[in-house]
Amino acid sequence: MKILLTGANGFVGTNLSYALSQAGAYELVLPVRSPPNNSSLTYSHIENIDANTNWSAHLNEVDVVIHLAGIAQAMHSFSDKDETKVLSRYHSVNVEGTLNLAQQAIEAGVKRFIFLSSIKVNGEQTSPNTPFTENDPPAPQDPYAQSKWQAEQVLQALAHDSKLEVVIIRPPLIYGPGVKGNFAKLYSLIQSGVPLPFASLYNQRSMVSTDNLSDFIKVCLTHPAAAHQIFLISDGDDMSTSTLLHKMATAMNKPSRLFRVPMRIFNICAHLIKKEAVFYRLFGSLQVDLAKAQSRLGWKPPFSVEASLKKCCQSAHKEGPF
């Protein structure tokens, strides 16, 4: 099977391209702007991804496209003028770039198109023990999530009018070797050894390791029942932020040093410094139901949270800070 994988030098793409190459059953086409150093894989060159990108040199005899590439950074504070530019950039890359690639994939005879979307299409948070499902109405809140939802829609429209089989995956927080963002911040806090006031956090969050995500994508490459479906996936082991910190500390062979501070204090502080969004990303609940992936594809996460956290933390210790 020949696979075109976009975003192969990104966080998820690096881990996925390695997993696919190790499987030995795939011929990989890895177009990137800047090939990573010290890699045993062979990369090709592609310019910016937008409505004008020419993919013809990369799509010859390709069976499946896995589309990971896109703009993923969160929206910050911009002036009206800057916000317009940012919105335009999200749409150009995440929507028009996806549409352009899928159209050329159809013309090249590609059979299946796997699109990595985001749980943010469903929304930003859930009530405890009320996980998101694939049947929930989309509720994207920020420009990134909106662009992912729009990309899903154009792909589904193309699939309806062609033979292209579209598979959409909406993962929650992804972690693994090389992870950045809030997960890396939690790692640094534990590494510092300072006491952390998070013992009273009883939220519930779903996560998925790069190993489990890669395994699920491999299933979606060929499984007949994956065609034209949306899947929410996770490690299948939801936990509070305090439990996550305990497990990370165990993986790092360090004490977690958690103590209790009432949640209302965090709420007040987040409001005063206008960081409510950061507060909810760290301390709110966001759960996903992976029952559809289990029942329709027979998939179960092969890697435990404990093993995945250990691998992630050992990599950070070996390679240096995230």
Image: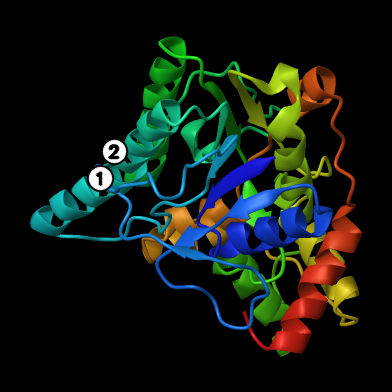
- Please indicate whether residue 267 sits to the left or right of residue 223 in the image: left
Element type at mark 1: helix
Of the 4 image quadrants, the one containing the N terminus is top right
Q: Identify the image quadrant of residue 78.
A: bottom left
Query: What's the distance in space between the residues labelled 2 and 1, CA to CA?
Result: 5 Å
Of the 4 image quadrants, the one containing the C terminus is bottom right
Residue at the top extreme, as displayed: 161
Residue nearer the viewer, 67 or 264: 67
* Residue at position x 71%, y 70% in the image: 177
Q: Is residue 183 above or below residue 161?
A: below
Q: How many marks?
A: 2
Report the coloring of the rendering: rainbow
Element type at mark 2: helix
Q: Amino acid at mark 2?
A: Glu
Residue 124 visible here: no
- Please indicate whether residue 170 sits to the left or right of residue 75 in the image: right
Q: Is residue 214 above or below residue 96?
A: below
Question: In the image, which disc is placed on residue 96?
Answer: 2
Binning the other alpha carbons within 10 Å of mark 2 as few (below 14), some (14 to 19) or many (20 upward) gives many
* Residue at position x 49%, y 42% in the image: 60
Q: Amino acid at mark 1?
A: Ser
Binning the other alpha carbons within 10 Å of mark 1 as few (below 14), some (14 to 19) or many (20 upward) gives many
Residue at the left extreme, as displayed: 81
Give the image location of residue 6, x and y in percent. 50, 52
The residue to which callout 1 is attached is 92
* Residue at position x 78%, y 45% in the image: 215
Q: Are marks 2 and 1 in contact (CB under 8 Å)?
A: yes
Residue nearer the viewer, 318 or 305: 318
Residue nearer the viewer, 252 or 226: 226
Residue 163 visible here: yes
Give the image location of residue 235, x and y in percent. 80, 45
Q: Is residue 292 above or below residue 93?
A: above
